[in-house]
Image (cartoon, rainbow, N blue to C red):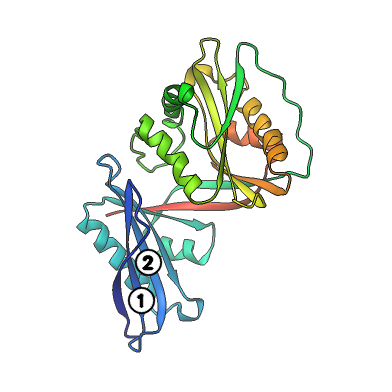
């Protein structure tokens, strides 16, 4: 089949990244597939890029996906990307396609869901700490310590994918919350402070604008010196109770965890999260 690739200008431009895209069409202009490559503008993150590739089911097994993948690889190399990654359901058509083209499994994500109609166990407070919470942008008095607490995610399991150091400053901390607000969604954060008032950990959830469906957990972290005391369990239990109170029409909460992060998976399981999907994050070094 003769396929034409049309480079596109993608409007999904973000402060730290942008996408380049290709549309695959038949000679008569009928769309049959597309690909999107996200480039990170931060110097430390620039060597790694993620992509999405889609071919209409009726048009598969005709070389369209391979043609789009070659365009993605060439576009990545043109922008000095060294590794491209994509998330695909385990044992899916996309998973087998990427494996055929030499992509290795960099890590596996376990998606789990909590049914908010089910009861949540009561988790006692942890001595020497106190909980705080807020919606949207962090209050000024907690801004610096919240930014500092982001380093608690630096050692999160990343499989065989070389994870760059994710640098946060106060401007980025504020901006991340503002972007969620601009999308019309709700950000709710529960955090724990130690006896000095410094943040020892936090957990974030984003709820759809209408307060219905499922909320999505974002970051959860506990700083290394505070681990092993049950802080994540305490915070996440408080988060569930708070979400139930704020959004009574919400059905559930969804989270994803690297399969080797056994501590967080045990915490989620104790709170009632049940696995429902597995995703391979496949990578190819260019």
Number of marks: 2
Picture quarter with the N terminus: bottom left
Q: Which residue is mark 2?
A: 35
Lower position in the chain sequence, tag 1 or tag 2 = 1
Residue 144 as seen in the image, left or right of residue 218: left
| Residue 221: image tag | none
At x 37%, y 76%, the residue is: 64
Q: Is residue 50 above or below residue 63?
A: above
Q: Residues within 10 Å of mark 2 (few under 14, many from 20)?
A: many
Residue 73 spot, x, y in % from top left = 28, 61
Q: Which residue is mark 1?
A: 24
State the SS at label 1.
Answer: strand
Residue 41 spot, x, y in % from top left = 27, 47
Give yes or no for contact between labels 1 and 2 (Cβ–Cβ under 8 Å): yes
Q: Is residue 278 above or below residue 22?
A: above
At x 31%, y 63%, the residue is: 72
User: In the figure, residue 271 lies in which quadrant?
Assistant: top right
Query: Looking at this view, is 242 or 277 the one in front?
Result: 242
Residue 87 spot, x, y in % from top left = 46, 55
Q: Residues within 10 Å of mark 1 (few under 14, many from 20)?
A: many
State the SS at label 2.
Answer: strand
Q: Is residue 168 visible?
A: no
């Amino acid at each position: 089949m003769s396929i034409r690739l049309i480079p596109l200008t993608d409007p999904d431009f973000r402060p730290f990244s942008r996408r380049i895209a290709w549309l695959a069409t038949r000679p008569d202009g009928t769309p049959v597939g597309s690909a999107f490559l996200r480039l990170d503008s931060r110097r430390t993150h620039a060597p790694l890029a993620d992509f999405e590739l889609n071919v209409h089911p009726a048009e598969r097994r005709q070389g369209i996906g391979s043609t789009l993948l070659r365009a993605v690889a060439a576009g990545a190399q043109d922008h000095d990307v060294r590794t491209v990654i994509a998330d695909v359901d385990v044992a899916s058509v996309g998973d087998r396609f990427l494996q055929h083209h030499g992509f290795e499994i960099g890590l596996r994500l376990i998606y789990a869901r909590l049914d908010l109609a089910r009861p949540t166990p009561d988790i006692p407070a942890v001595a020497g700490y106190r909980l705080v919470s807020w919606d949207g942008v962090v209050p000024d008095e907690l801004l610096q310590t919240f930014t500092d607490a982001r380093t608690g995610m630096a050692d999160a399991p990343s499989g065989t994918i070389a994870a760059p150091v994710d640098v946060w400053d106060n401007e980025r901390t504020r901006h991340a919350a503002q972007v969620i607000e601009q999308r019309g969604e709700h950000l709710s954060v529960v955090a724990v402070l130690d006896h000095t008032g410094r943040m020892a950990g936090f957990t974030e959830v984003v709820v759809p604008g209408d307060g219905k469906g499922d909320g999505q957990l974002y970051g959860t972290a506990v700083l290394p010196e505070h681990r092993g005391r049950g802080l994540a369990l305490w915070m996440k239990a408080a988060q569930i109770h708070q979400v139930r109170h704020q959004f009574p029409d919400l059905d559930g909460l969804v989270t994803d965890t690297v399969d080797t992060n056994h501590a967080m998976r045990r915490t989620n399981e104790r709170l009632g999260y049940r696995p429902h999907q597995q995703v391979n994050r496949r990578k190819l070094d260019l």
